[in-house]
Image (spheres, grey):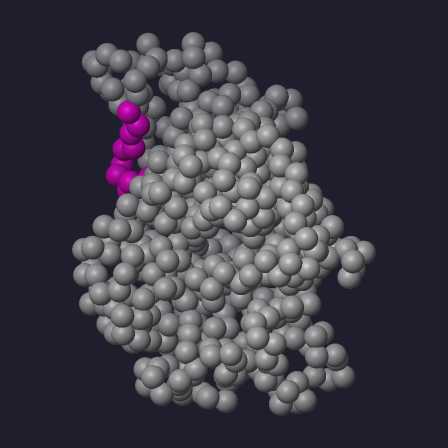
Amino acid sequence: MRNGHRPLLAATTMAVVTTGVAYFFGQGTAPAGGEAKPAARAAARPAAAEACQVSPKYPKRQLRGVWIATVHNIDWPSKTGLDAAHQQAEYVRILDNAVKRNLNAVFVQVRPASDAIYQSPYEPWSQWLTGTPGGDPGWEPLPFLIAEAHKRGLEFHAWFNPYRAADKDDLAKLPENHPARLHPEWVVRHEGKVYYNPGLPEVRSYTVKVIKDVVQRYDIDGVHFDDYFYPYPGKGTKFADAEAFTKYGKGMSLADWRRDNVDKLVAQVGKAVHAAKPYVKFGISPFGIWRNKSDDPSGSDTKGLSAYDAIYSDARAWIKAGSVDYVMPQLYWPRGFAAADYAKLVPWWADQVKGTGVHLYIGQALYRVGTKDSPAWTRAGELPAHLTLNRDHPEVKGDVYFSAAQLGKNPLGVLDRIVRDHYSRPALPPLMKDRGGRAPATPAGLRRSGEALLWQASAGARAYAVYRVAGAKAGDCATADGRNLLAVVPATGAAEQSYAVRAGGTYLVTALDRLGNESKPATAVLP
């Protein structure tokens, strides 16, 4: 639905045509230099969380991400044929805009359609780099993309499309080494495009192999799928998988078999990812409506396209099975929208993950802000109001925005408003217990030198959190939420780490591993 084809928008339009449009929009969310010798010490672990008063306005842990789409040059690179220096500069600008807005994760599309923006042993170079399918860009982008994200304290999630094989159905125009040409028996031509057949075990095995290769060879933090499974309804053409259904259906209905195929792939990918590197997260951003209540009493109070029935995507099954670490439903509709009300969908999704350990993040439609086909999106307060509403549901652990092109455009000044009202402080990533990790040692040697706060590097630290409290006493709850969090400082690899200070007070510094496990704080009182 992202990738330039906008089926979500089409599905919404279809729902509006059949149900009518009704809106009810609420209000928008609306120092001096010189050597100092303060006493430094490792503070005791803060009191239990329930003993500290934490503010939902200043969450300490929250995923704040942005999708970076490569297909059709939606976000990066801006056009084909740019040399490496221009591609790199464009990407760095995206990251710097993300950091400016206090985001902490990027979701970069590395496999748009059985092609790669990295040097793959299995698939050709993506045409969106050079303009030519299989064209060598002359450099290896993925290590650079990952390193630049990590350098800025951003998690890097590699985004894969599992089933799209080609944007056009002429296989002869694909590179000779393209898997669809090597294995034409794997593919289904459907309404001008080519898809891998999800019903074939060899397709699932191949997809897992491609993803596992990236996990093993690159320092990524996550593997991400979007909502493209079986094709979205288009012209009404039947998806031609009858032969596979006859061979593998085993008495199931066609719909149940298709859902089972997707469920199997999701489970296989999750197991393979975690077997290769237990700390790598795996999640999916499904279409925002699982099922409508009119079709299933356990569905949401909506009237739009059903992912369960239309594209055979059963996100509830993945949550129940624990096949994913997170779900990120794409809730690209405003509050009060008749067919799919954001205010009704958020609590529905929150209920699905409650008590499961599966994280819930919300896919937000930054690209819709400022469009004029819906009154809500003409108002700068609509998207910030979504984040305010999320605070009422502790299961919601963050938001990811589509897409990066809008980070620079800042439509209606909405990002300024989001930063002011919601992201005024940085945030650590939410902890996933199943992904393991261990807090590094408390930073040692915390002291001030001129206008820098210095400390010794902690083994295994990916970053350091710096807190500040006015006065000479911090208290046990100083790090309980994000109100005192000044910065998350990426580790540099140097023996000594630093942070620029401009005021006195009590500074607390903790060490974080790559998953955000946090050490006890070291404390220094600065004049």
Rendered residue at 55%/61% (across/down): 10
Left or right position of 62 against 104: right
Give the x, y percent position of residue 139.
22, 64
> Which is more toward the observer, 180 or 406?
406
Image-quadrant location for residue 504: top left
316 in relation to 527, above or below: below
Give the x, y percent position of residue 211.
45, 68
Give the x, y percent position of residue 437.
50, 47
Rendered residue at 73%/57% (across/down): 292
Rendered residue at 44%/16% (across/down): 469
186 in relation to 280, above or below: below
What span is in magenta?
Answer: 491-500
Image-quadrant location for residue 53: top right
Left or right position of 6 against 153: right
Give the x, y percent position of residue 61.
52, 36
Instruction: Give the residue furthest to the right.
Output: 297
> Which is more toward the observer, 263 or 500?
263
Image quadrant occupied by the C terminus: top left
521 in relation to 249, above or below: above
Rendered residue at 39%/85% (across/down): 171
Can residue 374 be seen here? The reply is yes
Q: Is residue 212 magenta?
A: no
Q: Is residue 493 magenta?
A: yes
